[in-house]
Amino acid sequence: MITTSVHDMTFEGLTEWLAERGHKKSRATLVWEWLYRERTTDFVAMEGVHPECVKALAEHFHIESMSEHSRQESKDGTVKFLFRLKDGNLIETVLMRHKFGLSVCVTTQVGCNIGCSFCASGLLRKSRDLSSGEIVEQVMKAQRFLDGRGLGEAVSHLVVMGIGEPFDNYDNLVKFLDVIKHQKGLAIAGRHITVSTSGLADKIYTFTDDDLKVNLAISLHAPNDELRTRIMKINKAIPIEKLFKAMDYYLEKTRRRVTLEYILLKDVNDQREHALELAELIGERRSLVNVNLIPYNPVDEHSQYQRTERHVVSEFFDVLKKQGVSVSVRLEHGTDIDAACGQLRSKQIKKEAVAN
Ligand code: SAH
Ligand code: SF4
């Protein structure tokens, strides 16, 4: 049985793989053109590629390793895909329409072990990491969906903010970024890619040293350890001081700005004093970070949390602004469809559990 996806191969990896089998290195370029420019799903359709090469590829790799289980389309152009993996697991991918382009939000793991108290993804523990090919394929599926519309639209931005903790699947994340940024592939610019972490400090050092030239977002969500531990239990193991030390290393070494994500939970972390404390915590890093306020998407299982009212969001925003902190509010996408990331998946899993 073929178990490897051709999307698991970096360009260099495929070139080597072909060379080892006596094929000219230049064939890798042609194969990648068929895969990423023509977006074919069948090796046999790769016209111009030597038949022996096609045969070898078809014997070792598959192009599609997941099928679309369902799709929800929102009035604002957001499309949520639920994909069924070969082992039966379900994952979610979201395509969003912005003024600046089209972005895809990818999943990196089946479930998540970090278990943040407000998140639908953490309700189900991680059953496995996704391979780099499975992450690449999510982008390909979204791109083929656009191709099908025939408007010549292309995915221009990527956010690694779907189900899972990308830094807990680090090697596959790096491989995925290599494929997706590669000039011979989809060539998505590093400055258009953002990886979000719940704050695995060790990996922030590695990520910095690897100099991947993509943006980093850190899920902070609280201005002090007491509150952060209450809503994100990972803070017990990696408290804010340790996290900020790693962030400072990143800021200094890469000279790139960091986004601090801050989910607003009614009466929990959304008061004026929290905004002031956050500004103080940021301190002299004001010119190096941007705070992104995230309206909470209610999750049925987490009924202890409510959404912050709009005027309170504005007040929180204004306090930060007055303190000289660069701040934005995340625009919401697809509020008329299953809103929170991981929700579509957890709903379907519940349905299947009832049916069995
Ligand atoms: N595991 C990584 C990336 C995936 S989560 C991380 O935690 O950063 C991506 C973002 O969605 C995080 O900032 C996370 O806190 C946020 N998020 C999770 N559940 C949410 C919810 N119910 N409403 C709004 N944002 C949520
Ligand atoms: Fe995992 Fe991120 Fe959800 Fe926390 S917010 S449980 S780290 S996916």
Image (cartoon, helix red, strand yellow):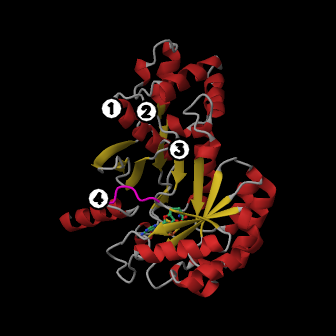
Q: Is residue 227 magenta-colored? A: no
Look at 53% across and 85% down and name the residue there. 230
Element at label 2: loop
The quadrant holding residue 353 is bottom left
Query: Does the magenta segment cover residue 334?
Result: yes
- Mark 3 lies on residue: 157
Instruction: Choose the circle earlier in sequence order: 3 or 4.
Output: 3
**Residue 39 makes an appearance in the image:** yes
Q: Position of residue 31 (x, y in %)?
A: 53, 23
Q: CA distance from mark 3 to mark 2?
A: 12 Å
Question: How many numbered discs?
Answer: 4
What is the magenta range?
A: 331-336
Q: Main secondary structure of the magenta part?
A: loop
Asked if marks 4 and 2 touch (Cβ < 8 Å), the reply is no
**Disc 4 residue type?**
Asp
On-image quarter of the N terminus: top left
In the rendered image, which residue does mark 4 sit on? 336
**Distance between the alpha carbons at the discs numbered 4 and 2:** 23 Å
Mark 2 to mark 1 CA distance (whole Å): 8 Å
Q: Which mark is residue 275?
A: none
At 66% from the left and 69% from the top, the residue drawn is 325
Q: Residues within 10 Å of mark 4 (few under 14, many from 20)?
A: few
| 340 is higher (above) or lower (below) than 307 | above
Structural distance between the alpha carbons of marks 3 and 1: 19 Å
Would residue 14 be found to the left or right of residue 341 on screen?
Answer: right
User: In the image, residue 58 lies at what x, y percent?
Assistant: 45, 26
Mark 2 crowdedness (10 Å alpha carbons): few <14, some 14-19, many ≥20: some
Q: Point out the tag, 4 or 2, that comes first from the N-terminus.
A: 2
Numbered tag placed on residue 153 in the rendering: 2
* Label 3 neighbour load within 10 Å: few <14, some 14-19, many 20+: many
